[in-house]
Amino acid sequence: MLELFISETCPYCQKVMKFMDERKVKYKKFDIANEASEYALIKLGGKRQVPFLVDKDRNVQMYESADIIEYVKTIL
């Protein structure tokens, strides 16, 4: 399952979530307002930037909303 690190107030995060929700893509959301999620994001990606997608099944991690959307299109 895809994991998406987000901030609810981030417009880029909202763009990615809207895209994924409209296409009924299953994902687990981690809001970095939660300290544990923020720590996990930094540990995985090296910086506190959202959105951040993790696809453990394909060993893919990425930032940038446009890149995330394009990637998800390829796995639908």
Image: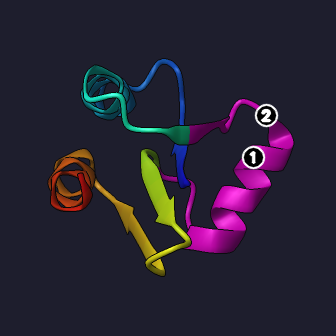
Q: Is residue 31 left or right of residue 53?
A: right
Residue 14 drawn at (x, y percent): 35, 23
Name the colour scheme. Answer: rainbow
Say if the magenta span includes residue 39. yes
The residue range painted magenta reads 28-49
Question: The residue under label 2 is which amino acid type?
Answer: Asn
Q: Which residue is disc 2 drawn over?
A: 34
Query: SS at mark 2?
Result: loop
User: Dot 2 surroundings within 10 Å: few (below 14), some, or many (20 or more)?
Assistant: few
For badge 1, the amino acid type reads Ser
Image location (x, y in percent) of residue 25:
38, 37
- Which residue corresponds to the image point at 35% horizontal and 28% vertical from the top-left? 24
Q: Circles 1 and 2: CB distance less than 8 Å?
A: yes
Report the number of numbered marks: 2
Would you identify the image quadrant in which residue 58 lies? Answer: bottom left
Q: Is residue 21 above or below residue 63?
A: above
Residue sticking out furthest to the right: 36
Measured in 3D between alpha carbons, the distance from the residue under mark 1 to the one under mark 2, in whole angstroms, is: 5 Å
The verdict on residue 70 being magenta is no
On the image, numbered disc 1 is attached to which residue?
37
Along the horizontal axis of the image, is 16 left or right of 54? left
x and y, in percent, of residue 73 in the image: 16, 52
Q: Name which residue lies at 57% across and 55% down.
A: 48
In the rendered view, tell whether residue 28 sits above or below residue 58. above
For mark 1, give the secondary structure. helix
In the rendered image, the vertical position of residue 24 relative to residue 62, given as above or below: above
Residue 76 coordinates in the image, percent (x, y) = 23, 51
Left or right: 36 as drawn, with respect to 48: right
